[in-house]
Amino acid sequence: MTKVTIVKNYLTDKVPRVCFASVMENRNRQKVRKAYTGLVLLEVNNLTSPTSKYSLKKSG
């Protein structure tokens, strides 16, 4: 039997994780997606400084 060594890096525990999931159901012998989780990335170009980002966030 092969021995497996697990090396744990303390830095990887601090990295945020995004987990995607999907809820499926069978309809007429076909899988149909009922719900899913996803990631939305919104990028706003031409912001002059971080403070303009906060003022845009407050006005929206």
Image (cartoon, rainbow, N blue to C red):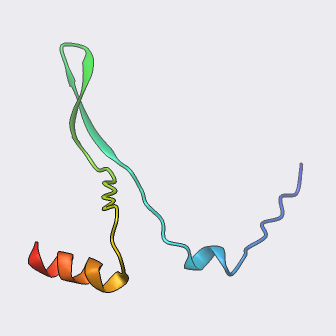
Name the residue rendered at 56%, 79% in the picture.
Answer: 14
Which residue occupies the foreground of this view, 17 or 45?
Answer: 45
Name the residue rendered at 19%, 82% in the picture.
Answer: 55
* Quarter of the view holding residue 29: top left
Viewed as shown, does residue 34 lie left or right of 50?
left
Name the residue rendered at 64%, 73% in the picture.
Answer: 12
* Quarter of the view holding residue 11: bottom right
Name the residue rendered at 19%, 76% in the picture.
Answer: 57
Which percent across, then down, holds residue 18?
43, 60
Viewed as shown, does residue 57 lie left or right of 50?
left
Q: Residue furthest top?
A: 28
| 27 lies above or below 36 | above
Which residue occupies the foreground of this view, 36 or 41?
Answer: 41
Which percent across, then down, holds residue 51?
30, 86
Quadrant that contains the C terminus? bottom left
Viewed as shown, does residue 11 lie left or right of 54?
right
Which percent across, then down, holds residue 38?
32, 50
Which residue occupies the foreground of this view, 8 or 2?
Answer: 8
* Quarter of the view holding residue 24: top left
Viewed as shown, does residue 6 lie left or right of 32?
right
Q: Exactly how many numbered labels are in the figure?
A: 0
Which percent across, then down, holds residue 28?
18, 13
Q: Residue furthest bottom?
A: 51
